[in-house]
Image (cartoon, rainbow, N blue to C red):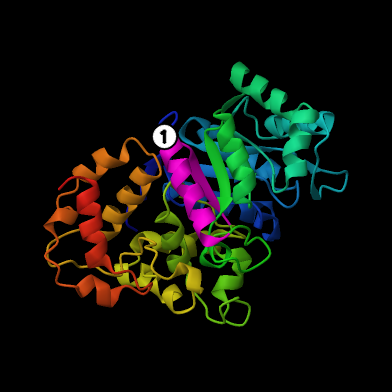
Amino acid sequence: MTAMDYRAFPRGGERASVIGFGMGSIHEAKNERAIEEALEVALDAGVNFFDLAPSQAAPFAPYGRVLAPRRGGILTQMHLGAVYGANGMYGWSRDLDAVKRQFSRVLDTLETGYADFGIIHCMDEDEDFDAMWENGIWDYALSLKEQGVIRHLGFSSHNPAIARRFLDTGLVDECMFSINPAYDYSRGSYGLGRANERMDLYRACERDGIGIAVMKAFGGGQLLDAQASPFGRALTKAQCLAYALDKPGVVTVLPGFRNAADVAEALAFCDATSEERDYSAIGTFAPQEAEGRCVYCHHCQPCPAGIDVGMANKYYDLARAGDAMAAGHYRKLARRAGDCVGCGRCDGRCPFGVRQSERMREIAAYFGE
């Protein structure tokens, strides 16, 4: 298998595998040994980022047995607000005492004295955000960070408006957010916010140095099934993973795994060809509001002048969004918008109807070329 790729979190510099390990479905493994095998397959392939919010509490014990001996080489993400009752079933709470008890219990079970990322769990409504402040959860999270019990503070959300409230604090390092073509185009239960609002959030995270860990990259599996897909057409896992990883600010994607076979199937992305990763098909069923917007899908490649059209667009969009470093990244490109010869090949290939040749002139003018 091709070696795993890694991306650094802007604040702290920790390097996370682009494919992480989501925990939401692991309880479906047939026994604890099957859970351990799935973790071992992932670790052996270079996966080093592990989310720790299962749908049942039972997987915590095998996680502890596998991860504890390798603790120094992995990154863990624990959720402040995910709680488990006497029956071990998942729920969430805004009660500070319940949050404290559960966090301490998970640390003990996992045999670790700290979490690399401590995220405030499932913040989708203004009421959630307000309760976090009023009930003392925010202050508790800050105190954990001050003590080093969590190394970085973050949050999970499906709502770009709530995510913006967290960004405005200036105190979060990570955002766990749902990214896939359906949600980005307001399809499905968690398709909150319009396409431009969601993309603006990703750019804001990149600008502010907040790393995004992606959840629900497959839309809960619906995008992989033509009958269940809100588009009436199936995408592949490779297409969904590539789509998420192309978004600004994204560091890692966390698919849900049920067993070692699921892990191996997702890891096949590392060996996928550019054709297998090509998600430009979404241009045929994206809504009208997506027309004329570059989503950095690279379907316009190759450029006869050697320009990476998608990256030129991305750095331009980030620079206009206020990212102070984007202009520097743009100028390091081997070929830039000013090298465009106006042949128009990219215009004909763009599935979103972007007039890239005109866009290149616009970008060149912006950067003074």
Up-down relation of residue 77 to residue 170 (above or below)? below
Which residue corresponds to mark 1?
Answer: 10
Up-down relation of residue 304 to residue 46 (above or below)? below
Q: Is residue 23 magenta?
A: no
> 112 left or right of 361?
right
- Specify whether residue 179 is in view: yes
Point out the residue furthest to the right here.
Answer: 86
Q: Nearer the viewer, residue 129 or 96?
A: 129
Q: Nearer the viewer, residue 208 or 245?
A: 208
Q: Residue at x 31, y 70 (%)?
A: 299
Q: Magenta segment range?
A: 194-215
Q: Residue at x 70, y 23 (%)?
A: 139
Residue 67 appears in which quarter of the rendering? top right
The x and y percentages for residue 258 are: 62, 60
From the image, which quarter does the N terminus lie in?
bottom left
- Secondary structure under tag 1 reads loop
Magenta stretch, overall SS: helix
Q: Residue at x 53, y 51 (%)?
A: 214
Q: Is residue 203 magenta?
A: yes
The x and y percentages for residue 296 are: 35, 60
> 293 left or right of 331?
right
Q: Nearer the viewer, residue 337 or 39?
A: 337
Up-down relation of residue 131 to residue 32 (above or below)? above
